[in-house]
Amino acid sequence: MAGPNYVLDKAFPVLATYNASDTAGVTAYRCVTADSATGKIDLNATATTACTGVVQENIDQTKVALGKVNADVRLLGITKVRVSDTPGVIVLGSKVAASGTSTNKGGVKLGVTTNIPLGIVVGPFPIGTPAAGDLIDVLLTPGMPALP
């Protein structure tokens, strides 16, 4: 079977100021984190913050600004994830963490010391290593501790 293999997706309410510095709204295949008090998700572009999951759909900023929209977030299983602007050398089996600025905010990079991994890369790649903006498949591993 080709494509994603989801085990658990959940709808989360989206923070009305989601990714406030971007007018694109919610963009699919980006790392998100949920606020523990409100349960609302926001973009996660920080490797030292644990990811709740990976958003699976695009939602227009106009709808997000209303503060009444839910987004589908993959919590467990295999998902596509966008590669960040500075990914490092990612290969099959690499542990990856949230990262990114500019156009690939909320993407992933090669996990390094002190990063909280999002998951393990399971493929597929274009020829060579993935570049900024490419989509890769990641097996989500919630609860994995920071890398030593």
Image: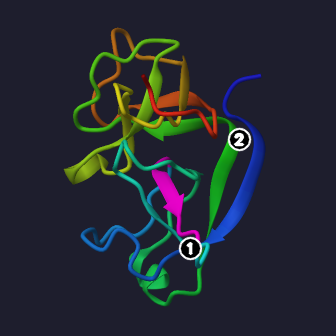
Identify the residue at image location x=30%, y=74%.
20
Tell me if 93 is positioned left or right of 127 in this view: right
Q: Looking at the rendering, which quadrant does residue 61 occupy?
A: bottom left
The amino acid sitting under disc 2 is Leu
Identify the residue at image location x=48%, y=77%.
15
- The residue at which mark 2 appears reads as 76
Crowd rating for badge 2 (residues with CA inside 10 Å; few <14, some 14–19, many 20+): many
The amino acid sitting under disc 1 is Lys
Q: Quadrant of the N terminus?
A: top right
Which is more N-terminal, label 1 or label 2? 1
- The residue at which mark 1 appears reads as 40
Identify the residue at image location x=52%, y=37%.
118
Residue 33 % position (x, y): 51, 58
List the single residue furthest toward the front: 148
Residue 135 % position (x, y): 44, 33
- Residue 55 shows in this picture: no
Membership of 34 in magenta stretch: yes
- Residue 89 shows in this picture: yes
Identify the residue at image location x=48%, y=28%.
136
Tell me if 76 is positioned left or right of 48 in this view: right
- Measure how far apart labels 2 and 1 are at the Cα level: 18 Å
Q: Magenta segment, which residues?
A: 29-36
Residue 130 % position (x, y): 35, 21
Q: Looking at the rendering, which quadrant does residue 17 occupy?
A: bottom left
Q: Secondary structure at mark 2?
A: strand
Q: Looking at the rendering, which quadrant does residue 65 occupy?
A: bottom left
Tell me if 124 is positioned left or right of 62 in this view: right
Tell me if 87 is positioned left or right of 111 in this view: left
In this orientation, which residue lies closer to the viewer: 109 or 66? Answer: 109
